[in-house]
Image: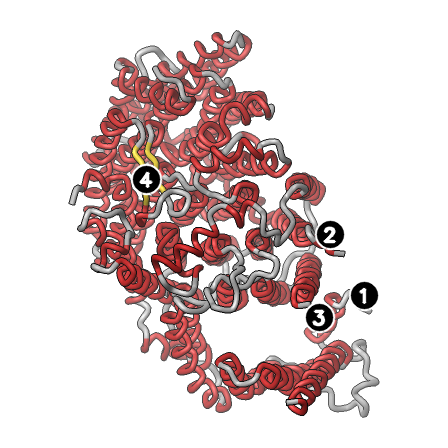
Amino acid sequence: MIENLQLLIDVSLLAFLVLIVFASIKMTDLFVVTMLFGIFSFVSALLFLDLDAVDVAFTEAAVGAGFTTVLMLSALRLTQPYENVKHRHSVLALFIVILTGAALFYGIADFPDMGDPNAPVHQHVAPEYIQLTQQKIDIPNVVTAVLASFRGYDTFGETVVIFSAGVAVLLLLGMGQVKCKQEPEENLVLWVVVKPMIALILIFGLYVQFHGDFGAGGGFQAGVIFASGFILYSLVFGEMYARRVVPAAILPRLAALGVLIYGVTGLMSLLSNKPFLDYNALSSDPVSGQHLGILLVEAGVGLAVFSTILLIYYSFSGREVKHHA
Amino acid sequence: MMIIDWISDICLLLGGILTLTGAVGLLRLPDFFTRLHAASVTETLAAMLLIIGIILDTGFTLDSAKLMLLILIMIIANPTITHALCRAAANGGNTPEMETGNPLQSSSQTVSQSSQDKQVQTETEISGKEPK
Amino acid sequence: MHELLEHYNYWIVVILMMMGLYIVIASSNLVKKLIGLSVFQVSVFILYITFGKVTEGSPPIITDNTDVYSNPLPHVLILTAIVVGVATTSVGLALIVRIQEAYGSIDEDEIHDMDDKDDFHIEKQV
Amino acid sequence: MDLMMHLPVLIVVVPLLAGALIVLLNHRKGAWLITLLTSIFLVYASVQLIQMVGQVDVISYTLGGWKAPLGIELRIDALSALMVLILAASALLVSIYALKSVEKEIPEQNHVLFYTALLLVIAGLIGISITADAFNIFVFLEISSLSTYALISMGRDRRALHASYHYLIMGTIGATFILIGIGFMYVMTGTLNIEDLAQRLPAVADTNAIRAAFAFITIGVGIKAAMMPLHQWLPNAYAYSPSVVSTFLAATATKVAVYVLIRFVLSLYGIEFSLVQMPFDNLLMILGTIGILGGSVYAIYQSNVKRMLAYSSVAQIGYILLAIGLASQPGFTAALLHMFNHALIKGTLFMALGLVFFRFASTELSVMSGMGKTMPLTMAAFTIGGLSLIGVPGTAGFVSKWYLVIALLDASLWPLALLVLVASILTLIYIGRVIEVAYFRPVPEGRTRQKVPLTMMVALWIFALSNIYFGLDTEISQGMASLAVNQLIGVTP
């Protein structure tokens, strides 16, 4: 019964996704396309939830539907919201797309059935992850365990990726400056409601940060949520005030600090001649060493992500609309 | 126990019906403000009824406590969002249709402003119908 | 019914990928290209997450209620990939803003024409 | 603490953390100094690693203390060590060169971030070269790519922005294709570790999914390596990026992509599957031939010397692919040798052009009129690089072309051997154009001998002289290449 229900949700959400993308191919108003993309991300987050990927769903909802959409709207403010309607060399495009599609259809033909517990994916490495997480790491959320310990090196790379995105955006757009006149209009309802809301968002961010061992969440999601609290503040009360709370100039340093926290935590194990990121070296008891290690690297990820996301937002929103000479 | 189950079912059913009416309203109503009105039904009352139905169904656990928090946030946030949207639309030069007596009779053709036309077009295309 | 649905996810994912790729190649608007790219990436994410699903499994958070968990590894991979996706999108948008400022357009065909003019201009100087 | 044991991970982590440290300190001169020190460390470490590989064959390093398919493993064999050496040496020379070049070309407020991005590119490329985890390749590919996009866009010309955007779109499609390919392999085997995959693939090798995975990875890597029909991003990206960036990228970036291709083809799929079962050898040879001819012909028609050399890079990738397509031991040796030598050649040429740009803010051919007299040392180095690119005996370029021709004749493909010679003549034509303008055209009026910073000249000449050194003494490069090949195809020497 439950399985059928899950399948039903799965089928309808995927159908939704196709409709949304189809609509965005047709649309020429970029605002609409952006909003459609936000919806697309949100629906795919629901789909991830339906497919048991709670952490992924959380991230996709926060990043895809939340931050990316805000970013695209900020970018549209600085560019043009309409697309010139013309379809150029669509024959070539169709050819490439059909070729790719054919290769994909060819490839998926002998995939194991979806959800088949005997598929190699579920037989080879995954059972060991679940078993070892219980034995050696002793936290309930296996995804966090794999993310921060088993494949901690990937996650270190991930933190560097977001850091390098911050560096890239900063190189391209600079930190931006805010003139006093850019204050938003007075809106009492928003002011009253948003203030306690921001407090709630920040508390929720902290909860997600430190509850990642037990449930969905972790440094990355927490960083995005925390940053979105400040983004909300700057949207409602004006960026000038937000920059007074968190000055733009310290954000790159905070992001770098986040990366360094992660890296140095990894290097700690070298002191006792264990490999990079071996958290067993952090404490005399291996399990508590793992706990400490995961806590530290998650803190690094959270800090790096929070500061980079906010930094990128500042870079876009603080840039003046320049008209081409 | 029976009664609670009944109440839960009624809540879920009512929530479902309201969601549906909200969706119909979103598609059929003539201008931005009336549509927003329809949407706000879905995002406040319907969503709340659905969540209450679920809470009653699962009984009092940690999950249902979280759901109650969710209701609280929805009560505060959703009307505010609707308000902010309305204001933004009004400030952007989008005025409500006052002249036509019965708003249901004014079709999308009579709505003159281009931004509204676009809105209509968007939603009809999503729903798979041809725009007029 | 079930037999038919066992590859349903994969089919739809392939269709989504094709549509995303089509937007990237056929659209000449830089922002829309980037959106198409994101759609393409998100469809790959769905592909991976579908790999990880186990029938009657539950999310990979250890509880006493069940022994069957979905595969956590694809989830971890896709968490990383989502971060990569948002990083790419933000760098792409920053580039688009700069292109708008430098060329006054975000239409690729127009920008190409201007590039050609730049080339020509320099050749004339020669 | 035995640092030697941890060198495999330190060569990735140190540049990454140095990049973060630069941002934290936010000091302009300090940024350069940290970059320089990091590259010195990298060169030292890569030399150590090569010696270690000579002793123990393969260095394996399990991260986090989790054994291979569970955790991520770093594996350094001779091929990886060779790549790390190329990357580290280029990084060192480029960072010496960068001091003055960056001062000139990059706005002051961006210096710190510029060096950060440079370090991240270096770290990303090294990370790709030593990891033994398929997904980890994707992660480090993206680290290097994101920073590359930013670095390219720092060029002064507005076309740099467009080139960077174009690269971003194509590069991301390429990376996503690689991700699809990895996913397809993962679903059939359940593992991501390359060794483990190699063991588990034969059982499922005869499936659509694996064949499709192979195709997707080849195309994805092909985009990154600028394989001929997928090369459109490269010419403008190289032509309009700052000199430091184009030098480093031309010397390394596409080679790392080719490395990934070799790694997947030889270590993962094995020769049997990829070159015999699939018609991959013929495909590579055809693509290589198209690349050699197309790239060379395009190069002849360019008026911007930097773009000319960029097209020449496309042609050189063609040589490497052609050599891999031979699927023979001499072929692979020739490919690896050319990867090494081409890094030297393109490093020299782009650095020389960087000096031209330093003085005249342009690399148009017309600007170079009479430059043999006004910038004699620079042009001399350029000439050495050019001769090496053509393949004149006594230069590094000759060695790899020689091996390639021998390998082609070995496989009795004499028409292709002839083609390589024809392509050398094409190279002679476009390099000859530059030399002709520089040495036989009159010096523009009022232009006197130009001064250039010593650091830049030193870096340039180290590159140029190494062209001659490795042209005369082939023991090191050839020895490394054949050791790598023997390890890859499982032949003991």
Residue at image coords 56%, 82%: B81
Q: Secondary structure at mark 3?
A: helix
- Cα gap from disc 3 to disc 1, whole angstroms: 13 Å
- Residue B130, labelled with which disc? 1
Residue D413 percent across, percent down from the top left = 54, 10
User: What chain is tagged by disc 2?
Assistant: C
Residues at marks 1 and 4 touching, judged by CB atoms closer than 8 Å: no
User: Would you place residue A132 above or below residue D275 in this image?
Assistant: below
- Cα gap from disc 2 to disc 3, whole angstroms: 42 Å
Residue A291 can be seen, yes or no: yes
- Cα gap from disc 4 to disc 3, whole angstroms: 49 Å
Residues at marks 4 and 3 touching, judged by CB atoms closer than 8 Å: no
Which residue position holds label 2? C3
Frontmost residue, A148 versus D97: A148
Residue A147 percent across, percent down from the top left = 40, 56
The three-letter code of the residue at mark 3 reads: Lys
